[in-house]
Amino acid sequence: MNASPPADIRIRQLIDASERSFAAGRAAEADTYLEQARREAPGHPLVLNQTGLRELRRERTTDAKELFERAIAGDRRNPSFWINLATAHGALGNDSEEMRALEEALKIEPRHLLALLQKGALLARTGKTRHAASVYHDALLSIPPGRRLPKFLEPFIEDAQAAVKANLAALESFLDAKLADARTGLDEQAQERFNHCIDVALGKKRVYTVQPAFLHFPKLPALEFYPRELFPWLGALEDATAAIREEFLAVHEQEMQDFVPYLNHGEHLPLGKLAPLNKSPRWSVFYLWREGRPVEQHLARCPRTSEALASIPRLDVPGAGPTAFFSLLQPRTSIPAHTGVTNARLITHLPLVVPPSCRFRVGSDTRPWAEGTAWVFDDTIEHEAWNDSHQERAVLIFDVWNPFLTEAERKLFRVASSAIREYTDDVLDRPRWDS
């Protein structure tokens, strides 16, 4: 390619104009721009490539192949030239040459979506379905989240998704057969973590990580729901469910004015998907403890609940924790996915009133609430809730220390958290631990 820089720019402009005209359905106009470029620089790689595409559309495949080869001779670093050559070889039935051209394109740009899709299709066409699924998987991973793809790619993307899905189903059946003996005698609990591992490998679940909005404490387990045996007080809490429910029902009937919206932020804050619930009674709470301070008049109305909370080794961070409240979710209301402030604490749920069609997700684990069955989870892992019933759902919620923190770490964390809050005391939108 010997064109001077100004001439090269001129040719690129003509080729771009030709491509835009063709894409807009103005084939004659596209040919006019291309012919002008051919008169000015007949040997320019872009001109040769564009002429090859025109010949390919006219089913003059051998001529197109030769033009693509000449374009590549002038510029071997353009992956599109190699992909077009591969297309010509494919139309001529030259599978091995098509693969070679695609491999050359992928050497230049390993994540080139079109080259990967075409390679996957070639492998599928030649019966190499597992290899095709692997290449298709790479193609799908190369698509940035939210990117809008050209319309013409949609059927190829659908083929890729179908091939990957079919391959994962075949792999699942293969694994089930291979694992049958090894699973013999193992209960569900013994296999829980392994099954999660396999579900991720099969695309049934995704990997979630902690995403604290305030302080991340490193080297703590990223567990969605924590094992019950780490909290020996859970059984006693569950035994008190009937008394706690009775007190909730009493304040719900007599003191509804003291239930306040759980989210109560300034309207200028970027709350995203949570914005519709801001200041909304559809998700309201009756505070027993708030940001480390007891709500004495509320605790006085709920002595059995207060007693149960007092028996638990709760979080104690001045100005932040403990926090405890009755959470009331209205019928046909969902809480969008969100994350909490720090993994140094964990959240406990004791379900009190749970109509059918209520469920809760933390990361990749979705569970129905069951009245009187408590759980502890890490709220810095993405979580969301649904009440799809026609009745209210009520849960007692409070925070506790992460059991993997040492006493020394808790002491240091208390000081650091308080210091940060003191430093940001005049900042209106500082992190709140109960939201």
Image: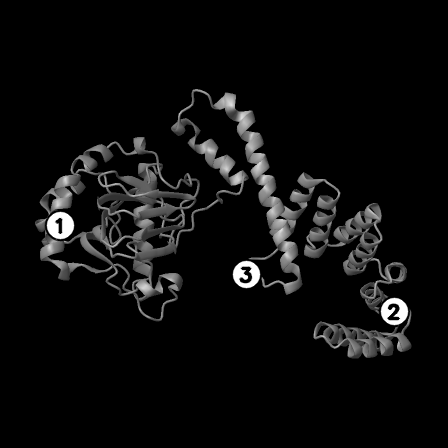
Which of the labelled discs sits on residue 44, or is there none?
2
Q: Is residue 368 shown left or right of residue 68?
A: left
Secondary structure state at the residue bearing disc 1: helix
Give amino acid for label 3.
Gly
Q: Is residue 259 shown left or right of residue 167?
A: left
3D distance between C-alphas at marks 3 and 2: 36 Å
Q: Is residue 133 shown left or right of residue 275?
A: right
Q: Upstream in the sequence, badge 1 or badge 2? A: 2
Secondary structure state at the residue bearing disc 2: loop
Identify the residue at image location x=84%, y=49%.
94
Of 124 and 194, nearer the camera is 124
3D distance between C-alphas at marks 3 and 1: 45 Å
Of 38 and 26, nearer the camera is 26
Q: Which residue is mark 3?
A: 146
Give amino acid for label 2.
His
| Count of numbered circles in the view | 3
